[in-house]
Amino acid sequence: MILYDCHMHSDFSSDCKALMEEQAASAAEKGLKGICFTDHMDLEYPNTKEFGMDFLFDMDEDYSRIDKVRKEYGIRIGKGIEIGLRNEQGVSERVTNGYKELLKRDDIDFVVGATHCLDMIDPYLADYWQGMSVKDSLRRYFIAILENVRNNPYIDTLAHIDYLVRYARIPGGDPDKYDGRDLYIDGENGDIIDEILRFIKENGIALEINTAGLKYGLGYAHPKDWILKRYRDMGGELITIGSDAHKPEHVAYAFKETVEKLVALGFKEYAVFEKRKPVFYKL
Ligand SMILES: [Zn+2]
Ligand SMILES: [Zn+2]
């Protein structure tokens, strides 16, 4: 069983309206033992104008609210953060230094490292997909993740490794349709993905199982099974699990089928980070 949901958002995230209290109440109602709030911190987010969102939050305020919510609900609540890593020249180093500064505090439980933007644009925007094939975009994304983990080896888990596919659009196609999703082929870019997996394994960074892929109608969680299998085959064992819920109804989303799949792939335990150290629980 998975009793901890270690990736979720609250009203401290620019793109989330759910109150921290509502998320915690949903987790308690679903019988979870614990959760971790990992609100969005994307330093130098490039599309603030387009969305009217800056993806920044005040960690002091977030964490003191967690202290209050902890007392109200009978579950454990971790203090986390989801940081948006960047590989663009001229941005990468500055952003990494910014995160290192923010992460100096000693009350953080869990740091989720994500790649949400590359080439100075959020791929959620249709413009990202113009001028390059889906195949090339995906390769470019995995290369960016490899660079990002190498430059940010202090993260605790690597989030939603094949996140980009959610928004895959064929250049020139209908900008409102994710018509490029089927062009994400099992095994393709395996060379880069193996390098990413090897790097995180050697550096004590966990691989995140993010069930939001199912919620987005992809038919699979991130990462897709073939990547999980490769990680397991190279001896990878350190995993974290999260729903990435932005709404109360999505807390612990699809955890039941996820545990069955992980066990079938040979995973025995998952990790919950406390004060940046993994504590293991049986699947
Ligand atoms: Zn994310
Ligand atoms: Zn998230």
Image (cartoon, rainbow, N blue to C red):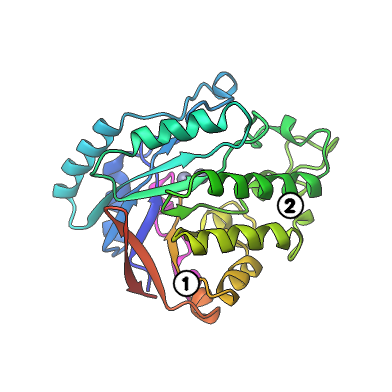
Q: CA distance from mark 1 to mark 2?
A: 28 Å
* Image mark for residue 151: none
Hey, which quadrant is residue 38 in on the image? Answer: top left
Which residue is most to the top? 49
Foreground pick, 153 / 58: 153
Eyeballing the image, is 133 above or below 265?
Answer: above
State whether label 2 is within 8 Å of ligand 1. no
Q: Is any atom of residue 221 visible in this view?
A: no
Left or right of 16 in this view: 64:
left
Q: Quadrant of the C terminus?
A: bottom left
- Residue under the point 13% across and 48% down: 71
Of labels 1 and 2, earlier in sequence is 2
Left or right of 163 in this view: 156:
left
Q: Quadrant of the N terminus?
A: bottom left
Hey, which quadrant is residue 20 in on the image? Answer: top left
Give yes or no for residue 50 being in the magenta stretch: no
Q: Is any atom of residue 87 visible in this view?
A: yes
Which amino acid lies under the numbered mark 1 shown in the image of this protein?
Glu
Q: Nearer the viewer, mark 1 or mark 2?
A: 1
Hey, which quadrant is residue 91 in on the image? Answer: top right
The residue pinned by badge 1 equals 237
Which amino acid lies under the numbered mark 2 shown in the image of this protein?
Arg
Query: What secondary structure is marked by label 2?
Result: helix
Eyeballing the image, is 174 above or below 250?
Answer: above
The residue pinned by badge 2 equals 181
- Rendering coords of residue 274 (x, y %): 27, 56
Asked if disc 1 and disc 2 are in contact, CB closer than 8 Å, the reply is no
- Rendering coords of residue 68 (x, y %): 16, 41
Eyeballing the image, is 218 above or below 39?
Answer: below
Q: Which residues are magenta?
A: 245-259
Query: What secondary structure is marked by label 1?
Result: loop
